[in-house]
Amino acid sequence: MPIPLAEINDLSPARFVARFGDVAEHSPWVAEKAAKARPFLSRDDMIAAFVAAMETAGEKDRRALLAAHPDLAGRAAIAGDLTEDSRREQAGAGLDQLTPDEFARFTAMNAAYRERNGIPFIFAVRGATKHDILAGFEARKDNPPDVEFRTALAQVARIIRFRLEDRVEP
């Protein structure tokens, strides 16, 4: 159930992080930094605060944020170790219903991408299909690592937007 902005602005910092600390995958520090930007005037203002918290962090923290993301259709998904948001998002893209050949292709592409770039392939899957995601792999596989680092951060910003749009009243 989406929360009204007035209620969000009244949360203590600890309760804010308890409620929104999982928006950035396994990185509650993003919510901690975003909470300092309150009061939010709109949901978009809140989203911007989360994105700014991520973008103004040091490279080590941003790299850790990216590394916290699971591979798409990877081991965490098979083991049932995804966050609820990630599980729902990957299932929505059909990644929980891959054929054995599709799963093998995702596994190989995840491994090659991680080997080349040192981070998982991050793609905001909401509204996408497995074919869209595979096309994204193909389009990005030869990009230099610095380009992929920036692209992955942009994808995380999209994920943050989607998750906050689900949780916060417009």
Image (spheres, rainbow, N blue to C red):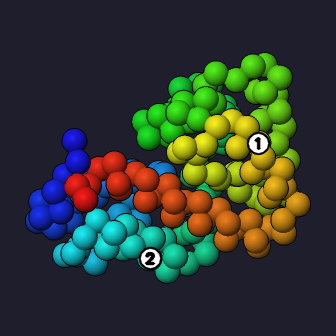
Residue 79 visible in the displayed image: yes
Going 60% across and 71% down the picture, which residue do you hit?
Answer: 60
Which numbered tag is attached to residue 134? 1
Front-lying residue, 141 or 31: 141
Query: Label 2 sits on what residue type?
Result: Ala
Q: CA distance from mark 2 to mark 1?
A: 29 Å
| Image quadrant occupied by the N terminus | top left
Please give the residue where the numbered disc 2 appears in the rendered image. Answer: 52
81 in relation to 25, above or below: above
Query: Residue 46 sits in which quadrant?
Result: bottom left
116 in relation to 34, above or below: above
Circle 2 SS class: helix
Comes first in the chain, label 2 or label 1: 2
Which numbered tag is attached to residue 90? none
Query: Residue 45 sits in which quadrant?
Result: bottom left
Q: How many marks?
A: 2
Going 50% across and 55% down the picture, which residue do you hit?
Answer: 159
Image spot of residue 127 (x, y percent)? 55, 43
- In the rendered structure, the answer to whether residue 54 lies left or right of residue 8 reads right
Image spot of residue 66 (x, y percent)? 60, 59
Front-lying residue, 107 or 102: 102
Residue extending farthest to the right is 142
Image spot of residue 78 (x, y percent)? 62, 25
88 in relation to 115, above or below: above
Q: Nearer the viewer, mark 2 or mark 1?
A: 1
